[in-house]
Amino acid sequence: MTATSKLRLDIVSAEKQIFSGDVEMVFVTGELGELGIAPGHSQLLTTLKPGLVRTILSNKEEEVFYISGGMLEVQPYIVSVLADEAVRADDLDEAAALTAKEHAEKAMAGKVSAIDLAKATAELAEITAQIRAIQRLKKRAKGERS
């Protein structure tokens, strides 16, 4: 693998650095949709929606992270994810996420103010993204056992 066939990826949250290393590809959810970033990508700066950051590592394995939103900066061979909150998908708690989703859905169904509705909608989007990360991880684990 040549130096130009990989990206340097850094994922940081307000609390700590979550990941730093070389990857072959990065997939994120930007404000306008899904982005796939390969080495040599043109420069880009965009906001990120709550969702997954998927990476294809140099050994062809996939690593998945959940972010609650943030910013993405892309240089031709460097990608920086500056997340409000970032967690490795392995560290997410599915039961807690499902419970939080149920609470957010109930809050949205009840009589709530516009502010409460907006907050519940944002929380539901974040929780749904966490659940997708967990399910993707489980699906990948099943495939490895088969």
Image (spheres, rainbow, N blue to C red):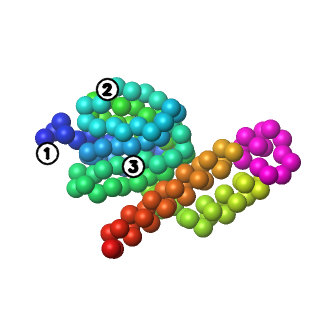
Task: Tell me the quarter of the image containing the N terminus.
Answer: top left
Amino acid at dot 2? Ser
Q: Which residues are magenta?
A: 108-120
Amino acid at dot 3? Arg
Q: Position of residue 63 (x, y in %)?
A: 36, 55
Per the model, the C-alpha gap separating discs 1 and 2 is 21 Å
Q: Position of residue 41 (x, y in %)?
A: 30, 31
Q: Position of residue 6 (x, y in %)?
A: 22, 41
Judging depth in this view, the residue of 31 and 90 nearest the camera is 31
- SS at circle 2: loop
**Quadrant of residue 138 within the rendered picture:** bottom left
In this orientation, does residue 15 appear? no
Q: Residue at x 69, y 45 (%)?
A: 121
Q: Residue at x 38, y 68 (%)?
A: 141
Asked whether, in this view, residue 99 is left or right of residue 44, the answer is: right
Tag on residue 1?
1
Q: Is residue 54 above or below residue 3?
A: below
Q: Earlier in the sequence, mark 1 or mark 2?
A: 1
Tag on residue 42?
2
Asked whether, in this view, residue 83 is left or right of residue 24, the answer is: right
Residue bearing mark 3: 54
Per the model, the C-alpha gap separating discs 1 and 3 is 21 Å
Judging depth in this view, the residue of 33 and 130 nearest the camera is 33
**Quadrant of residue 8 within the rendered picture:** top left
